[in-house]
Image: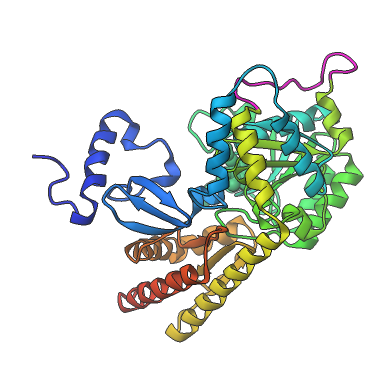
Amino acid sequence: MSDSAGANPSHIKSAEIFQRARQVLPSGYTRHMVVAKPHPYYAISGDGCWITDVDGNRLLDCVNNFTAMIHGHNKKEVIDIICSQAPRIMSAILPTEWEVKLAELLVDRIPSIERARFMNSGTEALMIAVKVGRAYTGRSKVAKAEGAYHGQYDLLEASFQPTPDKWGPADAPTPVANSVGTPQSLLDEIVLFPTNNIEATRNILRQRANEIGTVVIDPCRLQLGLVQPRNDFLQMLREETQRLGMVLIFDEVLCLRMGYHGMQGRTGITPDLTTMGKIIGGGLPVGGLGGSAKVMSVFEVDAGEPKVKQSGTFTANPMTMATGYTSMSLLTAEVFDDMERKSERLREGLEKIRVDLGLVGRVEGIASLSVLLLTDKPMNNYRELAVAMGSGLLEKIGIMSRLFGEEGILTLRGGFVASTPMTNDDVDFALAGARRALARMKEMGAT
Ligand code: PLP
């Protein structure tokens, strides 16, 4: 008898595929961030902001592949460029004009970018950005916020989600490996600072100024839409790094989607380097790095050997460059405004539901990201976030996102990511489902 016997009849095919997956992929998965119990739903197609799974269930996609699919699925112009570029040339050792066009677009829009380079993932962009910081300053250590996510590079994934027993002092956190086997010598190269603690962070940077060459921060949030760095904190980072001769990286792999000029356009603070990914590939795998001509000069070959060497078989391949350029060109300032208006409608609706149902918590979000937090605990840094999660918030998020799923809404752990095809009707669909799900959660005594 198949193991999927007795499975939920509306997910029978997904259950069957998962049984096969378990035979050939560790635990059935390639991406840990998509693990779902008892099994994932396997997608078969997508259209606009809707996804259909192999059993024919339709879900409102409020995740957009971790924010990357800003135009949702099956966007005509994006599909057209893929179909027209593929027969022309998919990849070769000759560069194409598409690479120049995408770089021109980014230089034109993103305040910190005078020169750009491309990679195949956000992780790779961060890896290369660190090399740039080291080559430019001659100092090897990198400072990051405790709890921040910057992709899978073992140096930068340190202390992504450390447990309290390993935290160390609050004003000088101890770096903790994210994967078993990470060498201590690598952890010695990372310096952690507490988000939003201006004094402690300033002291750390000043005291270790002769070792730290690079400071990296996601200017929008620490983890999955949670914990926003305050503007005065970012401003302090800008001033201190400038004073101490460090390279400041804004990791905008996710938050470039926050506006026409990226998150840096919203904050009014310009870093030395910006790492990118997700939306700049238009749905194909991508990474990007941009910065001032001075810092990016470490790649230059005109004067001989570059200080930082970068290549890669599929780097800047014409499929990604053409698709990224086309997709980014469709993102005008008006399109960003429209997405933001719809997200504000969603945030207002969620807050109304929260008040109507008498739920403790708050609605947060910026631009196209929105989240209902069922807690009254503060969350100004990783440790406060971990305390809130440990006192019931994590379980609530799990239940909430499962119940949203049962209402046909796919969320990023209960958080909502808007896309350009989303209409007010889609927002209202999400709100109606969220109201039913949260009312059920209240009845269950789970809020
Ligand atoms: N940096 C941030 C802020 C991210 O959110 C992500 C991915 O979610 C990354 C880096 C890594 O990007 P990628 O998944 O393309 O390697």
Q: Is residue 306 in the magenta section? A: yes
Expressed as whole percent of the image width and height from the top left, the position of residue 200 reads 76, 54
Q: Is residue 346 magenta?
A: no
Taking the image as drawn, is residue 189 in sight?
yes
Quarter occupied by residue 80? top right
On the image, the x and y values in percent for residue 424 come to 52, 71
Q: Left or right? Give the position of 74 relative to 205.
A: left
Q: Position of residue 417 (x, y in %)?
A: 54, 59
- Closer to us: 74 or 266: 74
Quadrant showing the C terminus:
bottom left
Magenta residues, dominant SS class: loop
Question: Is residue 233 visible in the rendered structure shown here?
Answer: no
Q: Camera-side residue: 66 or 59?
A: 59
Judge by depth and name the residue closer to the eye, 414 or 359: 414
Residue 23 or residue 144, whichever sits in front: 23
Q: Which residues are magenta?
A: 301-315
Residue at 51 percent across and 82 percent down: it is 352
Left or right: residue 198 compared with residue 144? right
In screen coordinates, is 281 left or right of 16?
Answer: right
* Residue at left offset 48%, top offset 50%: 73
